[in-house]
Image (spheres, rainbow, N blue to C red):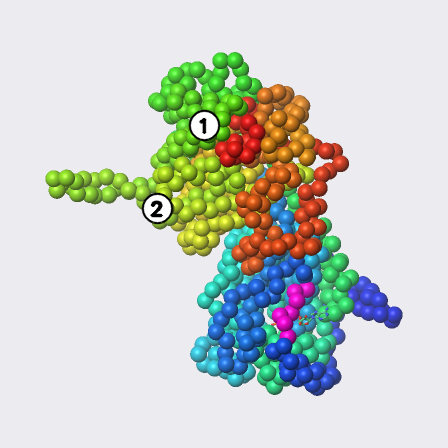
Amino acid sequence: MQAGKIVQRPSGNGTPILQPVTPSEKPAEGSTHGVLAAAAAAAAAASSASKLAEPTPVNPSLPSAATLGGAATPSGKATPSAATSATRSKTIVLTDAGRAPWYNSIGEPVSAYVVGIAGGSASGKTSVAREILKKLPNVPWVAIVSQDAYYKSLSPEESKLAFQEQYDFDHPDAFDYDILKRCIQDLRQSKAVEIPVYSFVQHQRMSETNYLYGPAVLIVEGIFVLHDPAIRDLLDLKVYVQADSDLMLARRIKRDIVERGRSVNSVLDQYLRFVKPAFDTFVSATARHADMIVPGSHNEVAIEVISQHMEKQLRNRSRKLRAEFYKTPATNVPAPQGTDRHSTSMSPYDGLGSAYERRTSLTHMKPRLERNESFGLSSSQLARGASSTSTADEAGLPPNVTLLAQTPQLQSLLTLLHDRSTPTSEFTFACKRVGTLIVELATTLLPYREKEVIIHGGRKHVGHELNIESLCSVSILRSGAVLEPSLRRAFPAMSLGSLLIQSNEEDGEPHLYDVALPSFIRRRETAEKSWVFLLDAQIGTGAAAFMAIRVLLDHSVPEDQIIFLTLLASSQGGIHALNRAFPRVRIVVAGVDPGLQKLRIPWQSSVSNTASAIKPERDESRGYDENAAVDEDDLSPGFNRRDNLHLLASPPLHSVDGGFAATAEPKQQQQRHSSLTKSPAKGSRVVFAITPGCGSIGDRFWGTGSR
Ligand SMILES: Nc1ncnc2c1ncn2[C@@H]1O[C@H](COP(=O)(O)OP(=O)(O)O)[C@@H](O)[C@H]1O
Ligand SMILES: Nc1ccn([C@@H]2O[C@H](COP(=O)(O)O)[C@@H](O)[C@H]2O)c(=O)n1
């Protein structure tokens, strides 16, 4: 993007004004005037350094500085307070609202918005970044990554020099631009990354790293963020923070004594030997690459301009996918020539041909449940019972879907689930039994290898064993968790992860609130070798499933190693959109219902009376069904529902370095939160429901909702 070049300068009366600058114009050179006065002030500050509390973060909604990063053994020089804070990571993540879809309707990620902030040491880069972040209340998941984390590793000799303040940390060559570039590239493409933790006391990266996933906005700050052309190319907005040299020195002396374990003399030595010359030669020269030059103090107007610009850019990138999935008819599914539907080969369309096309279009034209027809399956299909393994395409489902054999036994269990009069205990029991069948079938899709064992009598026997390094489940909260008991029976020691995905109240889009994945999924090298059972109770529009699959792909789980387990799907719903976007993800489903409906329900209705309060909204293409019941996954949260979810998964309103922490809700967040939950004027909201459906499966399973 091309932002106008703007520099903010004080006018005669002290009011900041905005005026354009030419690309060649350099910021005013800092003067060394005032350095000694600053040093004197710093000496006084140093004497009271041990009394100083941790600096208050500029953004009150951010974690306190002391909570950031990990602690490391301090050098002998550091005061206790300096030692602790000197290892803090400047990487900050703010999560407040949920994250809206960051991908298009074919599942490709849309780039995160990346801002680079350069400037001299202590010019105010981090402070500007935090102020921008504070001004973006409607932009969830903003991360600040500091270039400091990407200082090169030092050899023992270099390390020795560093401890004697003889190493030049201000030369452009001190940084590893390649790994910083990879990190920005990955975050831009929504991939999970590990951010190194740098210790200014140890002069090196610590062994621990910070997991970071999912910022819609990434702010990268550091003295040489605008130096490397390849990094500049990754920035959507380039900002340079300009401050007078004496101001930077005064701030640096104070900060380095309090936070980085330095003495006044060491700061001054380092400043005169390296910092100032490097600033004059290299850092200030990078200002010419900036789209905006922001003063290091009194910069409120510039920050306002930047944040408004960013909000506009982000609005332009926002997606409305659920409506798209709902509208897209199944007949749009491309039906390339091809192969076996259950094949794990690269193209799941192979062998499918036009039969699939005919079936999907038929299903679309005839979505209504007819007398003597059981939820999308003919009586002949039912009669085939256990021998039936190919009913998925007959039921209008795409080729990556495996439908459980529609035996009379399964049908009777599904009937219990459909029957709104089924008591909770029986409903839960039936869910678990169906869940067991789903899990067992899904398990057949995993790879096996031969295994030789010795049997009774001492003879060898060649059998089979699972041939995978790691397998875990990830539940889409909260209804996906209804399948966990069944999974536990087959895999008692399996790691369970979860994703909290909620429909936004205003537009029905899924929003991601929390990511809790097993550690081997968070690390790319192990995620690439892992298999995941993704669990959800139903697939209606498929929007939540879509988002969950995207999260796993962002963590480098291979598409064909994701198996989606679900109790019920609509044959005309998002299952087709899922297939189009992620054809290699296998879906195992127990039952299929023919309809998917857009409904309007009252805003204030509680979970327990939601279903009974539903009024079907007439939809031209599909008509409406008085018997429609809400698909829980597609149910937008109302006041009560949101509260319930907060109890289930503590509100991830506050995240530190990618690790979510439930905290007391700061005032600012309370305001944002209440703005998220307030009722719109219309008094009703739109949800999508599978018809005839089983109602809200999670509520019925846990006995918390209506039938
Ligand atoms: N606008 C400002 N007004 C007052 N103090 C500021 C301002 N910006 C930064 N500071 C202070 O200056 C010091 C260095 O700021 P920081 O943002 O960490 O600089 P940088 O990231 O460029 O090294 C911090 O102690 C910070 O509180
Ligand atoms: N081990 C180190 C590494 C870096 N520095 C100084 O940090 C400055 C950059 O960080 P800012 O937050 O001030 O942008 C840079 O000027 C280095 O001199 C250090 O002192 N020790």
Magenta extent: 52-58
Question: 249 or 501: which is nearer to us?
Answer: 501
* Quadrant of the frame with the C terminus: top right
* Place of residue 246 in the rendered image (x, y in percent of width and height, measured from the top left): 71, 79
* Place of residue 109 in the rendered image (x, y in percent of width and height, measured from the top left): 57, 46
In this view of the protein, can residue 661 be seen by the observer? yes
- Name the residue beneath numbered marker 1: 426
Query: Which SS class for mark 1?
Result: helix
Q: Is residue 398 above or below residue 626?
A: below
Q: Is residue 176 magenta?
A: no
Residue ID at (44%, 79%): 156
* Place of residue 200 in the rendered image (x, y in percent of width and height, measured from the top left): 54, 74
Report whether 82 appears left or right of 135.
left
Magenta stretch, main secondary structure, is loop
Report the residue that reaches farthest toward the top.
371
Badge 2 density bin: few <14, some 14–19, many ≥20, Cα 10 Å: few
Residue ID at (56%, 32%): 705
User: Disc number at residue 468?
Assistant: 2
Q: Is residue 625 above or below residue 5?
A: above
Residue ID at (36%, 43%): 492
Report whether 649 appears left or right of 666.
left
Spatial CA distance of label 2 from label 1 is 35 Å
Residue ID at (69%, 55%): 667
Q: Does the residue labelled 1 lie within 8 Å of ligand 1?
A: no
Question: 100 or 639: which is nearer to us?
Answer: 639
Question: 474 or 143: which is nearer to us?
Answer: 474
Badge 1 density bin: few <14, some 14–19, many ≥20, Cα 10 Å: some
Q: Are marks 2 and 1 in contact (CB under 8 Å)?
A: no
Q: What residue type is labelled 1?
A: Glu
Q: Is residue 54 magenta?
A: yes
Q: How many marks?
A: 2
